[in-house]
Amino acid sequence: MQFSKGKFLEIKEDQQQVYKDGKPVEGEFKKRIRVLFMPSKPDSMWLNVTDAPIDVIQASAALVGVDQDVMFPSRIGVFNDVPFLSLATGATIDDFSISQKLPPLRQKEPAKA
């Protein structure tokens, strides 16, 4: 599994063109949620979290602007000569790792008596 490491800078919701059979469907758009990600190496890129579990989207929003690196399973691709970053298929919040100085992304349930 490949991982990416860097900082989450911004989160935004916009629209993306709907494609069918590799061609754009005229006038059809769907909601897209992206996080601006700056890899530990220079240059930032958008990470598409639209189809991620809600806890991943919420954690991404909480990490925006935090001066800590985030490591997560990812895949990198290129569309129309523009590189993009996506979460690896099946990635969950448990796959994310950040500095030990920050609280865990998911709070563990207290032990039942």
Image (spheres, rainbow, N blue to C red):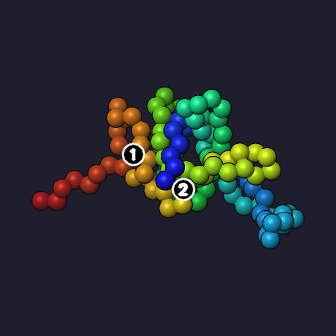
Relative depth, front residue between 97 and 81: 81
What residue lies at 79% left-to-right and 70% top-to-bottom? 20
- Residue 83 rendering spot, x and y as whole percentages: 71, 45
What residue lies at 55% left-to-right and 32% top-to-bottom? 40
- Residue 96 rendering spot, x and y as whole percentages: 44, 47
Furthest-bottom residue in view? 21
Q: Quadrant for residue 89, please give it.
A: bottom right
What residue lies at 26% left-to-right and 54% top-to-bottom? 109
What residue lies at 32% left-to-right and 49% top-to-bottom? 107
Dot 1 or dot 2: first in sequence order is: 2
- Residue 15 rendering spot, x and y as whole percentages: 74, 54
Pointer 2: residues within 10 angstroms few (<14), some, or many (20+)?
some
Q: Secondary structure at mark 1?
A: loop
Pointer 1: residues within 10 angstroms few (<14), some, or many (20+)?
some
Visible in this render: residue 102?
Answer: yes
Q: Is residue 67 above or below residue 108?
A: above
**Which amino acid type is marked by label 2?**
Ala
Relative side of 70 to 22, left or right = left
**Which amino acid type is marked by label 1?**
Leu
Comparing marks 1 and 2, which lies closer to the viewer? 2
Q: Secondary structure at mark 2?
A: loop
Visible in this render: residue 55?
Answer: no
Report the residue marked by disc 1: 105
Furthest-right residue in view? 26
Relative depth, front residue between 111 and 84: 84
Furthest-front residue in view? 1
Relative depth, front residue between 12 and 46: 46
- Residue 49 rendering spot, x and y as whole percentages: 59, 52
Q: Which mark is residue 88?
A: 2
